[in-house]
Amino acid sequence: MGDPGHRPHVLLMSEITADGRLTLKRGASSKILMKYMSHETEVLLHRTRAACDAIMVGANTIRIDNSFLTVRLVEGKSPLRVVPSSLADIPDDANVLGPAAPTLIAVSSRAPTERVAALRARGVSVVPCGEDRINLVSLMETLWNDFSVRRMMVEGGPTLNWHMLHHRLVDEIRLIHLPFIVGGDDTPSLVGGMHIDREEDMIRLTLKAHYLCGTNLVTEYDVIYPRE
Ligand SMILES: NC(=O)c1ccc[n+]([C@@H]2O[C@H](COP(=O)([O-])OP(=O)(O)OC[C@H]3O[C@@H](n4cnc5c(N)ncnc54)[C@H](OP(=O)(O)O)[C@@H]3O)[C@@H](O)[C@H]2O)c1
């Protein structure tokens, strides 16, 4: 029996343009923008990964960016790679299914058993968690209890960022600012899905650090949720 209510400390980290976008347009890989990060900032990203027990991205980011999510530019262990995927439909050739680091795919009860079996055959931990979509609150508890995850990093995309914030599961945000404007009404921004009616519902951030890393401005915030 684990500890109910315990969850990892969560840092959301993202590259972001001056107009708050995460990529060039809907469906485009963020790797295009990441090319413009300075080497020092890439090192910061990898150092941050190495300091975490787990790293989570949404299933669409895996489909679009085909991320590795490993530590490559610094010494250190790659964290457990965590992907919520309701139907377990992670492409067979996804880099995240490779042997470079352990991987956990959280699936809903809608996931076809043959897909779950195929993922397990690849050596991936498949964790049933939720009816329709992934129940992120319960996933966080499972990560704490069964996988000893104490510190986790979230690297997007906007849909996952929104759901994590909506459930008050993000403690800190670290942004790598890229000096570009890309525009576009439906271009993915840092947080999708959020529509609030009242200013009391805004999620507030306390700026705790800002510095240049190579040529990139980096800002760090604590997250302050509205009163319930
Ligand atoms: N600049 C950056 O730092 C950065 C970082 C990451 C991503 N990106 C960009 O973001 C874009 C993708 O973002 P996205 O918003 O489309 O997708 P996403 O946040 O990467 O993934 C969302 C998907 O995760 C799955 N999911 C299952 N349960 C969920 C839950 N409870 N909450 C949230 N997601 C859940 C759903 O797919 P299923 O229905 O299949 O379960 C959902 O559609 C790409 O263009 C990528 O390049 C940018």
Image (tube, helix red, strand yellow):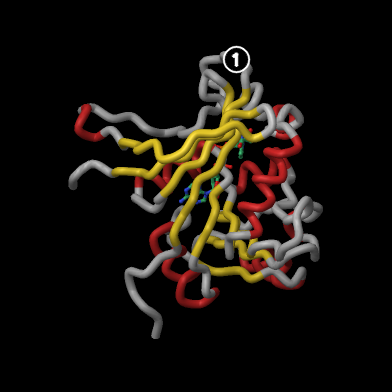
- 118 or 51: which is nearer to us? 51
- 169 or 120: which is nearer to us? 169
Visible in this render: residue 86?
Answer: no
> Compared with residue 125, is residue 176 higher up or lower down, i.e. above or below?
above
- Could you say where residue 101 lies in the image, as x and y percent from the top left? 73, 64
> At 62% across and 25% down in the image, what residue appears?
178
Residue 221 relative to residue 81: left or right: left
> At 61% across and 52% down in the image, what residue appears?
48
Residue 48 relative to residue 37: left or right: left
User: Of helix, strand and loop, which one carries label 1?
Assistant: loop
> At 50% across and 44% down in the image, what residue appears?
160
- Could you say where residue 213 lies in the image, as x and y percent from the top left? 64, 35
- Could you say where residue 194 lies in the image, as x and y percent from the top left? 37, 33
- Could you say where residue 103 lies in the image, as x and y percent from the top left? 67, 64
- 77 or 160: which is nearer to us? 77
Q: Quadrant of the N terminus?
A: bottom left
Amino acid under label 1? Ile
Quarter of the image where one finds residue 75: bottom right
Residue 222 relative to residue 63: left or right: left
Residue 116 relative to residue 158: left or right: right
Q: Residue furthest bottom?
A: 1
> Compared with residue 109, is residue 67 higher up or lower down, i.e. above or below?
above
> Compared with residue 67, is residue 141 higher up or lower down, i.e. above or below?
below
Visible in this render: residue 26?
Answer: yes
> Compared with residue 133, is residue 34 higher up or lower down, i.e. above or below?
above
If the picture is divided into quarters, which one holds ligand 1?
top right
Quarter of the image where one finds residue 6: bottom left
- Which residue position holds label 1? 181
- The number of numbered discs placed on residues in the rendered structure image is 1
